[in-house]
Amino acid sequence: MRPGVLSGPSGYTAGLALQDFTAVLDLQPGEHKCGAVYQGYAPSSPTEFAFSGFSGASVDCGGELGVLLRASIGLLSVATTVWIAPPTHDGSQATAEPASVDAAGGITGVTVTDPGSGYAREIFQRTAPTITASVAGGAGAAFRVTLSQAGSGEEATWSVSAIELLAGGAGYPDFAYVTFSASAGTTVEYPAAAYIFTGRLEPTVVAAVSGGEGAELSVALAEFSDFFSGGQAWRVSSVGVVAGGSGYSNGSPVTFTVTDGTQQYAANATINTGRSEPALTASAPSGAGATFTVTTLSNATSPNSWGVASVAVSGVTSGYQDGAELSFGGSGVTEESPASVVIRTGRVAPTLSAGAVGWSGGSGAQLTPTLTEIVSDGGLPAWTVSGLDIVTGGSGYSPYDYIYIAVTDGQLDGFWEFYGYVESVDESGAITSVTISSGGRYFKSNGQIASLQVISGGQYYSDTGIIESVNIGPYDGGSYYKATGTITAVYLEYGGSYYVATSTGTAEIDTPEVRFSSATGSGTTATATVDGQVGSPTFGTITAITVDAPGSGHLLKGAAWGIEIYIEASIWHLAVLTGGEPPPVANPGDPNDCANFSDKAEQSHARCLRRKAMPVSGDCGRLAVH
């Protein structure tokens, strides 16, 4: 057997020997390493774990050993630690550690390693500040500011509740913002905001129109209360025409310019130019030889327009389509709505043919239509189907089969179509009689214009280019004013939040809890001392820890390292002893706890893990594997 060695102040090498099996683990304090150190091997004799560098430190292994699956060894600190409660105010938590112990392991001194901050809070009292108001851009204005208080004590604040205008001054721009100044030492949580209104007079506004020359317009203003600016203003109520000029286009916009004052938003207006009777010309979409002469008539509208009253035609005409409409225009003519004038040509009898559609498969019928001349709409001639001669009845037809008319030379008159059907058939399905529900109306145009029918005259005019009037709506007058520069009112938007904080020389001091955490010691209490002296450079920090009761069993940092052993085993019972038997467990069958396995048969297939920290300063006890 070869003993293992644990050596060195900061890095340790643990040697573990068991007959011919040896494993070496390099360890740092607080570190452990795991591996299959012994696997599938049952020793027949005890093995010693010998450690040097620690007085009296030894661990003996003896007894019956089953199958040891895995083991690891590590080092950890079991020194007593100190915890100080964090501050109740804004700051950082203090830290400390035991400085000395007595023979019984009682703590006799504590060192503050970090004094922290925020364990005391300076107490202030709040008073009202002095707030003054001013406006840039002018001179001579004076104000009195009134403050109102909200809250009390250390929560008290003051805000601007009113601004009294003492003197209006001169030269101030309208809507300028007020500047609020606070006395020295004032804390401004957020500033007040206000702006001014100045006195207003009627402005000077002129109007002009581009695109022509020689026009002169006059502008009339009306005073009103402007909802958007909340002040007195003037709007354009009307625009007069002093001189109409020439060359202007109807509907052109009017431009308004403020020569003395301020425009808040512009007026909108358009011009009406003079109108004269237009010289209309007419044309047809097809045909040749016609000359059209248009006669117009006033529509008596305002502004006035003229419509087509009649159209005369002359010349030898041909190729014109019946029902086609004329188009109207002319130099300098404006069309507001088009006229509707329809061409009526000469009419002769059309050429029609007839047939039957057998819904059940009939065929072979031959029908000849008989035409009769009638008077159609507008007194024009047209021809209707008054009868159908059955030349051949065909076969396979049924009653109510459809009879159609086809126009081979001519056209339908409007929407008057033919409707007819088979009334009776013989036993072979040959048509024996028919019924005509509507004979329709048909004609053939000869292409010569017989008349022109005026349906509607439309609206036309010629623009004189002379301005006659200006259109401006009741809500299109804009908003204008002339500022006097003298402040007449102040509008307070919000009052802000201000206060002056003065120290009372006193403080609110924490009493932080101090706790001791130890694996071996107990019974220690201590009190933290907080610097509560206002103005001290260490104000709000912990300056000392006073031990009230030392307790016992504590170990200091550096002198209190422990061996951390992990063992994973199966089949046989494990017990870890540190000077006595381990405490019993509530659930001995739990495979995650092997501290109290006593029935080998019951636990024959259990795998368990046991972790134990043993101090190595002084007598470290025994590790027994049964």
Image (spheres, grey):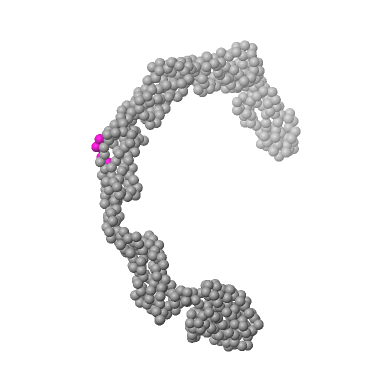
Is residue 350 visible to the viewer in this orientation of the structure? yes
**Rendered residue at 67%/31% (across/down):** 404
What is the total number of numbered labels drawn onto the structure image?
0
Q: Can you tell which quarter of the image residue 387 is in?
A: top right
Q: Is residue 527 left or right of residue 60?
A: left
The N terminus lies in which quarter of the figure?
bottom right
Q: Is residue 484 left or right of residue 449?
A: left
Q: Is residue 535 above or below residue 382?
A: below
**Observer-nearest of 415 and 565:** 565
**Rendered residue at 39%/65% (across/down):** 115
**Observer-nearest of 3 and 406:** 3
Most extreme residue toward the top, as rendered?
315
The C terminus lies in which quarter of the figure?
bottom right
Q: Can you tell which quarter of the image residue 597 is in?
A: bottom right
Query: In this picture, which residue range is highlighted in magenta?
Result: 163-167
Instruction: Please state the horizontal and vertical placement of residue 177, each as a whole percent of the image.
Output: 34, 38
Instruction: Please state the horizontal and vertical placement of residue 151, each as a whole percent of the image.
Output: 28, 53
Q: Is residue 186 left or right of residue 624?
A: left
**Rendered residue at 42%/71% (across/down):** 97
Instruction: Please state the horizontal and vertical placement of residue 501, each as a whole percent of the image.
Output: 29, 53
Is residue 611 visible to the viewer in this orientation of the structure? no
Q: Is residue 577 above or below residue 373?
A: below
Instruction: Please state the horizontal and vertical placement of residue 282, each as a whole percent of the image.
Output: 57, 17
**Rendered residue at 36%/29% (across/down):** 262
**Observer-nearest of 617 and 366:** 617
What's the magenta bit mostly, secondary-structure-wise?
strand
Question: Is 69 a magenta residue?
Answer: no
Most extreme residue toward the left, as rendered?
166
